Amino acid sequence: MPELPEVETVMCGLRTRLQERTIVRAAVNRPDMRWAFPPGLEQRLNGARVIGFRRRGKYILMRLAGGWSVLLHLGMSGRILIGPLRPNQLVPHEHLEIETDDGWRIGFVDPRRFGSVDLVKTVDEDRHRLLAELGPEPLSGEFTPAVLSAALVGKRTPIKAALLDQRVVAGLGNIYVCEALFRAAISPRRLAQTIPGARAGRLVPAIRATLAEAIAAGGSSLRDYVQPDGELGYFQHAWKVYGREGERCERCVPPIEAGCSGIGRIVQSGRSTFFCARTQR
Ligand SMILES: [Zn+2]
């Protein structure tokens, strides 16, 4: 499931092909994904010039001349395909197609249809129902230890669950929460109400560094490696704990001296958490 760095990478890829281009054809191929496509989407896109992009949490906003923005969410399995225009191209599960005036074709493919597309006036982006409740952007100056502390005061849920709550901080999912907690040496089971103060002071820079590294990896994937089908955003990245159950953790080397039995896995709220039980307290 795409999280903030993957969404940022997808947005950068879209920007390279769509910024300052005019959309010469747009087609909606079914009535809905997670929700119905907004009425008039094709008409709004046809002939529109794309003037900018913005990411908010896991959402992409594509801004059109004329004051409208297209809100995109990739859901669980949504993918954006970009390639040169080919006649009679058929892609399974492609629910939205866009063609540009310079001969590129962009498709939103989502077999499971948890993704969504909406239209919002650009001036009202932050009032859209899906964006209005989002917490601070983790890479912005608004996300400080004091702000995180205030959001966690009195919360009797594990910090893992608290960080997945998009109202606490926007854009994190299962992978980057595991990675950031490892980096901050904070146990995923620790109650959120014990984080305010010094631990929040470690956690905020850990979240920022984790995301910044992943975004850098995504950026280099765009530059260095054009996949044959032009799929954006799902780059290879070396996780420190995610998906590494039983492997040696980088802080507990050599393992005998450190007494670390390797990276552990527990299930919290139905989802796997990967962590080092020795160093994350
Ligand atoms: Zn360890």
Image (cartoon, rainbow, N blue to C red):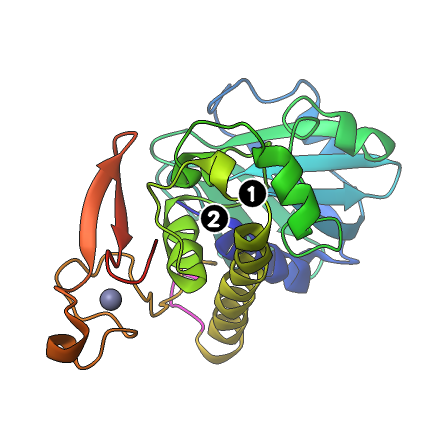
Question: Does 100 sit left or right of 3 as displayed?
Answer: right
Q: Which residue is located at x 82 percent, y 29 percent?
A: 124
Name the element at disc 2.
loop
**Residue type beneath disc 2:** Glu
Q: Is residue 95 visible?
A: no
- Magenta segment, which residues? 226-231
Tell me where residue 91 appears, x and y as whole percent: 38, 44
How many circles with numbers are drawn on the protein? 2
Q: Residue at x 77, y 25 (%)?
A: 127
- Residue 77 visible (yes or no): yes
Seen in the picture, residue 173 relative to 176 is either above or below; the reply is above
Do the residues bearing badges 1 and 2 touch, measured as CB atoms within 8 Å? yes
Q: Which quadrant would residue 169 be assigned to in this image?
A: top right
* Between 148 and 228, the one nearer to me in the picture: 148
Q: Nearer the viewer, residue 155 or 227?
A: 155
Amino acid type assigned to the residue bearing label 1 in the image: Lys
Q: What residue is disc 2 on?
A: 3
Location of the N terminus (image quadrant)? top left
Residue at 74% across, 58% down = 19
The answer to if 156 sits in the magenta stretch is no
Q: CA distance from mark 1 to mark 2?
A: 6 Å
- What residue would you read off at disc 1? 58
User: What x and y, as percent, mark residue 143?
Assistant: 68, 49
Where is 23 relative to 168, above or below? below
Mark 1 close to ligand 1, CB under 8 Å = no
The answer to whether 146 is drawn above or below residue 30 in the figure is below
Mark toward the start of the polypeptide (1 vs 2): 2
Residue 225 in the figure: left or right of residue 267? right
Q: Quadrant of ligand 1?
A: bottom left
